[in-house]
Amino acid sequence: MHKRSLPLCASLLMVALVAGCGGGSNETNVPPPGGPGAPGGTTFDMSKANATITGKISFEGTPPPNDKIQMSADPYCAQHAAQNPTTETVKVSDGGLENVIVFVSSGLSAGATYATPTTPVEINQENCHYTPHVFTMMTNQPLKVKNSDMTLHNIHAWAEKNPQFNVGQPVKDMVSETKFKNPEVPLPVRCDVHKWMGAFIGVFDHPFHTVSKSGGSFELKVPPGNYEVTAWHEKFGKKTMMVQVGDNDKKELNFSFNTNDKGTAD
Amino acid sequence: MSSETPNEGGHKKPPIPTPAKKIPALNIDKRGDRLYEVIYLHKWFAISSLLLFGFTVAMVMVDYSREWKRYQREFVRLQIQRTQRDMQQVSSSLDRAKFQQLQQQLQQTRAQQQQNEAQIDKIQKQLNDLNAKYYAADENYRFAKAVYDSDKYEYEEAVATKRSNAPKLAEKLKETEKRMNDYKAQSEKLTLDIRASNTELDKYVGKRNEIQKDMETMLADYTRLQTRLNTLNPGVIVTSFRNAPVFDFMNPSERINQIIVNNLYNDQPFKAIPRVDRCTTCHLGIDQKTYQDAAQPFTTHPNLDLYLASSSPHPMESFGCTTCHAGLDRATSFQNAGHMPHSEEQRKEWQKKYNWHEQEFLETPMLTTNDIQAGCYKCHNASPEVPQAAAFNSGRDLIRIYGCFGCHKLPGYENIRKVGPDLSTVSGKLTKEWVRKWLANPKDFKSQARMPQFWWNSNNSGSTGNTNWDKRNAAEINAIAEYLWSKSKPKQLPPGRTNGNAVAGKQIVETVGCFGCHAIGPIQEAANQTQIRRRHGFNLENQGSKVSQSWIYNWVKDPTQVWPETKMPSLRLTDEEAANVAAYLSSLKNPEWEQRPLPEIDQAALDDVTLELLRTNSTDIEAHEKLKDMTAEQKNLFAGERLISRYGCFGCHNVPGFEKAQPIGTELTEAGSKLISQLDFGFLPIEHSRRAWYEQKLKDPRIFDVGRVKRPEELLKMPNFRFSDKDVEAVSGVLVSLVKDPVPLEMRDKTPQAVADGRQFIAEKNCRGCHLIEGVGGDIRPTKEQAQWPPNLNTEGFKTQPLWLHSFLKDPGSVKLRPWLTARMPTFHFTEQQAATIERYFSALDRVDYPFISTDVETDTQRLSVGADLFMKLQCTSCHPTSNAIPPGKSPEDLAPNLQLAHERLRPDWVLQWVRDPQKIFPGTRMPTFFPPNDKGVPVSPFPNILGGDVTAQIQAIRDHLFITVGGGRRAARSGTVTK
């Protein structure tokens, strides 16, 4: 005790000598306002995304036929699904490939964060079939999963970069909700009860992504810059192209797939 | 002091006789009668004292300016910076509007207060007055009570002893009691008055106090940081005073931090010196989460969950630093601590930055980040693997797979069967010609061969400058082959079927599970999955150029009939399947190799070899005479036997005649503490460290002979395994981990014996080649579709009933649990004890009872009917059949396990957890959860109207239905009866 108090006294003495009688600080002091380095970073202003990239995903050659689906294991499905059902892997109309995820894969300014949409993305299980078959969303954006069928579906996201999501929906019109924290493209979704049911999600940490529509057309709104744009299809894999857009610019970017293209992942 | 005239102030000395004029008297007028001039003396005295002073100051300064103090000052600066940053953050996140509002309110209340100042003053005064009165009254009461107590005792005593003054005392007692009660009443009244006054005062100042309190709460974080900042930075003068020489004995802010670990010593000659780790003197942020992004030496430890934190398994206070990292414990400078660079770039950087150089005499330099896992083994040596140390574990696996323990004594590898095949029956399996070609260079036949190369290495090939080696090597190999054939007694096997279909065989080999232990050709390792266990069995490459189809048939049909000690289990192949597999494997050929000519046998070389071997225990003349009398066959057999003994072939193979031979390699039990001076680096320009030597030895074991002049029998004998760089790194990591450091018992790994035994056993049987156990293994997975992966055995102990598991392990073929799996659980022919080792291991891992458990389910009819309802509503049968029949329209791969078996296979408690959240037990399982959590993480049932939506009760009902109704299990004997 003695040994400790001596240095303490000495220090206190010195403090007193040096600082003099500083006195207690007034309890109503307002702290100085935070400097420029305040936390939070900047959230991207979406009005700056004024450049447009449009284009078409064309398909050369004869599109391969889709696999036929055998639904006899579940009478409900067999009864409600379309006649001679097939998978939706390859959908070509007007020479354009549908269900291709088109997204900015690099060139975005590092460190920028983007507001997470609060409106949920929806996927419906109807007549033993996912609608939509391919869609994109942002990280942490809610995903609503609906079962419109009178049969059991389980929605199983075979994620690798996110925790897997696998929920059984035994009741008609049941809705489950989930979110994905990390970007993952593609994130395959399957129903383990009906193995023909499949969908693909593109989860991004930015809002510059879309899915090609019927006829293979797409449109992306981006801020001015120099980008690498990737097109991904579940069967034909990935293609990338570079594009440079200025303020309020409009650029066309056309991708082309053919039967020899092979998927890398999946 | 100094004076112009020598007489003034000087000593009175007898006058010196006037010197003879002849002697020149230098400055005689100034120095007078002295032999020296005082003024000079003073000057020199002044100069030397100044110098002395200067040097003393410099000495103290040099002594005080230490590397570690610089780091500590830097760290304080860093802390101040962070605190200021935090203050800024706190202040910017402060709800300024609310704060200002409070401030305004405060001002308002103050203004109001001013109006009522007179009133407040009056109440305050009154309150002070009352307090004083209360104090007096209270004191009076206490005194009165003391008097009362004493009177009471006197009265009681008087009554008891029947003294005459008792009545008088009774009266006195009454009086004192009254006085006491009066005072009490007085003080109680005052208490009430004070309370009333306070309430009144509150009317005027209560609001203000409240606001002030709110403001303080809002500013709490900020004030805390402010205080911290003040403590960190008390000003230059205070800090320099505290740390000034001499004054620093009191309470210096710069000081050496040290951890003294109990019962841990440095083993020095003749003395054990306590271990005192001073690393934290400079590594100041090591145990604080917030310094992850700080530069070294302040960076946070990369894994606080596992190390340093007091809640972690390795708290800093009881493990210190050098226990794992090695290095010199008491050092307080970068150089002395024994830091070791992990790469060439870092070495250069350190040389530049810290003037770093290797320490010649430090026997325990720090482990680099590359081989830090080697620091684990000294405590984690009870079980064959160190949790989470993947690189280290793969090194241990490699040692087991390649059989290093055949020649070298290595801890943890005792009582393991030799890794190579039994050579006592070799002539029934192979041809002599094949063996001669194979021994010359095994990797040439199979790129992944585990058999190392003994001949044509860096010290016994033409590259040494001696061209005789080619002939000599061929003669040695031939002699060994001749010896083996002379001793071999081939097993009589029935002729195997050779009419199989290779295409069907390929399909079987690829699906049935061979790839859990074997590979064909080099393995393409996936980025996130090692497949080291696929080297457990030999590589199947070019098998057709090695053994006959008939032999392969017999082998795959029942390996134990060919070799009873084999590790290969039975895959329960039908005759046809075995024939197909044999057809496929024998189609894997290397025609180029087959057509290669055999090396010629040179009799002169054989004579040389024989003579040299004869000389080892006879004189030169005797040796020559013996050689003359020997036939070629005798020479071969003699040389073959002696060479096998020299090269230690029996370390890996059972060789007839060498059943009791001792292993020939150096003991490696303390390889990590071997003195560097004891390692022969030869003439190689490599770093003189243990790690570098072991790596070089593993890469090319005989390279240390290069440049040396040796006779053949003196040459290094270790064969070349042609390890990849990655393998070399892993194995040498294990070798440097084998230190003799005595570790106190309390630091040692406390893995239960059942777990340690289990791990050892599953490693020997290579269970992890197919299964994921403790999160490790499943090496077969990359060769299969995900739906075809063999089961993950996480929670196996908690999951399965001991009886079921036992019967399954004994006869896996009898259970058709997952009809969709193409891979088969092989029949290992486990003994009861072996099966129990596995079961005990799983039970101990999950900390569940074994072997006696109750599988009875306590339930009632109502719950059973709810369970049946839920079972139907959840449509469990969409995937799970409840009989052996496959439902129409389904193929086996669409199915989940047959639920009829659940009641005899699963533990009832496990089912409850499984149904609640299957992903938690088996991430990636196809089984969905039906009770997904809501926003708050609470599981919600899709049927809110059943059992009030109670998830636990619903799951219980399902389980009960499953066990009792579906399975026909036993109900618990609740009311004294057991119902079936």
Image: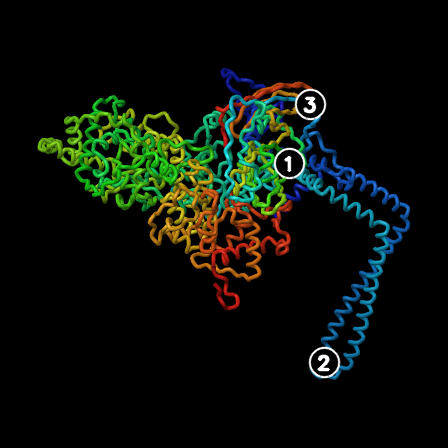
Taking A95 as reference, is A174 above or below it? below
B836, B818: nearer the viewer: B818
Determine whether label 2 and label 3 are within 8 Å by CB.
no
Taking A184 as reference, is B874 above or below it? below
Q: CA distance from mark 2 to mark 1?
A: 95 Å
Q: Residue at x 31, y 35 (%)?
A: B501
- Mark 1 highlights which residue? A121
Quadrant (top left, top right, bottom left, bottom right) of the N terminus of chain B: top right
- Residue B158 circle label: 2
Q: Position of residue B784 (x, y in %)?
A: 43, 37
Q: Position of residue B880 (x, y in %)?
A: 49, 48
Q: Could you say whether the residue bearing mark 1 is in a helix, strand or loop?
A: strand
Crowd class of label 3 (few under 14; some 14 to 19; many from 20; radius 10 Å): some
Comparing labels 3 and 1, the label whose residue is closer to the camera? 1
Residue B218 placement, left or right of A256 = right
- Mark 3 highlights which residue? A50
Residue B440 placement, left or right of B77 = left
Residue B537 placement, left or right of A44 = left
Q: Position of residue B886 (x, y in %)?
A: 45, 47
| Residue type at numbered disc 3 | Asn
Labels 3 and 1 share a subunit: yes
Q: CA distance from mark 2 to mark 3?
A: 107 Å
B205, B413: nearer the viewer: B413
Q: CA distance from mark 3 to mark 1?
A: 24 Å
Q: Earlier in the sequence, mark 3 or mark 1?
A: 3
Residue B476 in sight in this render: yes
| Residue type at numbered disc 2 | Ala
Q: Which chain does the numbered disc 3 sit on?
A: A
- All told, the count of numbered labels is 3
Q: Which chain does the numbered disc 2 sit on?
A: B
| Residue type at numbered disc 1 | Val
Q: Which chain does the numbered disc 1 sit on?
A: A
